[in-house]
Amino acid sequence: MAREEKIHIVIAESSPVLAAGFSQCLRRLPNINVNILEVKNPSDLYACIKAGTPDILLVNPTFGGSFNPATLRTDMTSDELKIVAIEVGKLNNHAAALYDDTISVIDDIDTITKKVKSLCSSPRGQSEEKESLSQREKEIISLVVKGLTNQEIADKLFLSIHTVITHRRNIARKLEIHSATGLTIYAIVNKIVDLSEIKL
């Protein structure tokens, strides 16, 4: 049986109950391999999108007060992202038209499976935008998001602390990411670290 490509899904939902429910449901979809990241506020969402475009953004239309898909699309350099509304109540036609699709809290597994497969039916090209990182820089990102200090990284990699700081500056410049949250999201999305390796 052919191995399915992993689908990257970001869930933007401030309610922990809804976010956890959708997360568990998506992980149980038959014959679909998913990597899921939950974000709780708009700044984390933008950091996540900047770190690497996921395949699907599942978002509550009330996220961050009032979520506007058009604004997010304007700010993005890629048009590959599929934006899907979480329907708690029925969206009006105008609101629903802003999204690529909707998934309701009352949809069954078969319906959600069909929608996810349909959304991902067109192949995505691998983004090379962030591929200028060296292997050493990826090692440093991995250690930073695991919570090591500059001195601990220097000791572990047998580098001077000055070299570590220089690498970190270069990483921030290349990725245009200047927060620990953004770097963590980048590391997870780009498989530099596994979610299980990070202390939350």
Image (tube, rainbow, N blue to C red):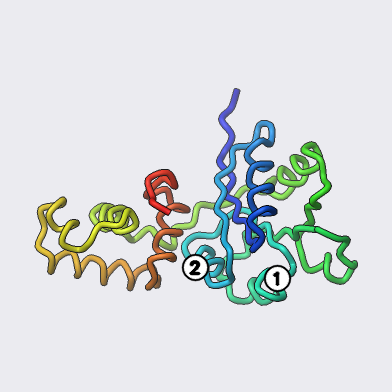
Amino acid type, mark 1: Pro
Secondary structure at badge 2 equals helix
Query: In the rendering, at what x and y percent does residue 141 appear?
Result: 31, 58
Residue 47: mark in rendering: 2
Which picture quadrant has residue 31?
A: top right
Q: Are marks 2 and 1 in contact (CB under 8 Å)?
A: no
Query: In the rendering, at what x and y percent does residue 54 appear?
Result: 57, 56
Nearer to the camera, 181 or 73: 181
**Mark 2 crowdedness (10 Å alpha carbons): few <14, some 14-19, many ≥20:** many
User: Residue 40 vs residue 174: left or right?
Assistant: right
Amino acid type, mark 2: Ala
User: Residue 172 vs residue 31: left or right?
Assistant: left
Residue 30: mark in rendering: none
Nearer to the camera, 18 or 162: 18
Q: Quadrant of the N terminus?
A: top right
Secondary structure at badge 1 equals helix
**Mark 1 crowdedness (10 Å alpha carbons): few <14, some 14-19, many ≥20:** some
Which picture quadrant has residue 175?
A: bottom left
Q: Which residue is tagged 1?
A: 69
